[in-house]
Image: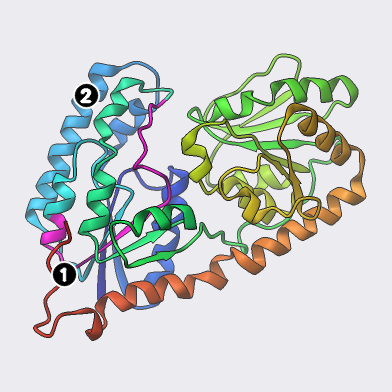
Amino acid sequence: MKRLVALVPNVLGVAPGQRARIELWAEHLQQAGWTVELHPFEDDRLHDVLYAPGHMAAKARRMLGCYLRHLAGVVRGFDADVLLVYREAALVGPAISERLAARRTPRMVFDLDDPTFLPYRSPVNGWFSLLKVPGKTRSLFRLSDHVITINEPIAAYARQYNPSVSIVPNLIDTDRYHPGAPAGDGRVRIAWIGSHTTRMNLETIAGPLRRLHQTVPAPLRVIADEPVPIDGVETEYRPWSSANEVHDLAECDIGVVPVNDLPWNSWKFYFKTLQYMAVGLPVVARPLGSNPDVIRDGVNGFLVRNEDEWHDRLLTLVGDEALRRRMGEAARATVVESYSLRGRMPKVIATFDAMVAPAALHPNGSRPAARG
């Protein structure tokens, strides 16, 4: 049995990126003959305070406790054929524990779905974010035997430091995400799924939503960890949960992906775009990051660049049921054909299998010296 140990930053079952990467892959890797162990850096106590405003003393204390626990585990070592690091093994500091873990494991794979090599100041944690050390990402590229990235822009950046790079976009379980029945009261609902850290994106379309509501009462359904009230807009809040998110999305009619003009966002793959499309919703989105690759303007959604276009495209969709249905069907087909877990998972499995194939090792059966 092949053994994979994954070092991940967040507690399991909560963080969207982590859920859409190794947590989603794990079951299928196990079916393909791998044992998979996931070791989160966070514990529940740290997670409970880390993404809430304030509590800096508690955050620092619990962060230190998690770092010491994590480092002790790395020192003990892991019984693994392949080590996977998703984003970073430790939420703070340079690549100390990652470097130590790489030296103690035959092969290392680094999976990156965000531009963590860019400086980023969290809207919740402010300057506390500086402890993340963006330069660590370049060290992880060099340390790894193989790098998996979510898209071509991040892959191109990674190739500057490591020639062994493959691309695996976010995949979605189309057996779980599927079209459902609308809410049933005859009103057209606009869906936004996000979190406290991305609410600023939704707030960028407050003006177009208010204009829309002056014409048609199309409620905005916010699926998140906290309400996001918008003056002049009727909002329905649904607390996010893994058990309910598909049902809450499938009751809606249109999905929106507003995005701020920040350097970070132009590198991103927007998983919420796939979530909307998988349940058969046409999407209205900014043409940043992965959105122009996924959305065919006028076919399975609309790409918009300013407030007038936001208002006009939403008004068009709200008023035309046949158009919503046609675009929603095209959106679902796009996901099934290009981003389904069932269709793309064999490539992920083959990537990990290649790490333990005889050709991947030196003649004496050892791993090559760590890069960098």
Looking at the image, tell me whether mark 2 or mark 1 is earlier in sequence order: 2
Q: Amino acid at mark 1?
A: Pro
Looking at the rendering, the stretch of residues picked out in magenta corresponds to 101-122
Residue 326 position by quadrant:
bottom right
Residue 54 position by quadrant:
top left
Rendered position, 111 above or below 223: below
Residue 2 vs residue 273: left or right? left
Rendered position, 121 above or below 2: above
Q: Nearer the viewer, residue 160 or 317?
A: 160
Quadrant in which the N terminus is drawn: bottom left
Label 1 crowd (10 A; few <14 / some 14-19 / many >=20): many
Rendered position, 170 above or below 54: below
At horizontal 45% and vertical 59% (from top left) the residue drawn is 24
Residue 316 vs residue 123: left or right? right
Residue 59 lies in the magenta-colored region: no
Q: Position of residue 318 (x, y in %)?
A: 86, 37
Q: Amino acid at mark 2?
A: Ala
Report the residue marked by disc 2.
Answer: 60
Rendered position, 168 above or below 204: below
Q: Position of residue 35 (x, y in %)?
A: 29, 70
Residue 246 vs residue 233: left or right? left
Report the residue marked by disc 1.
Answer: 106
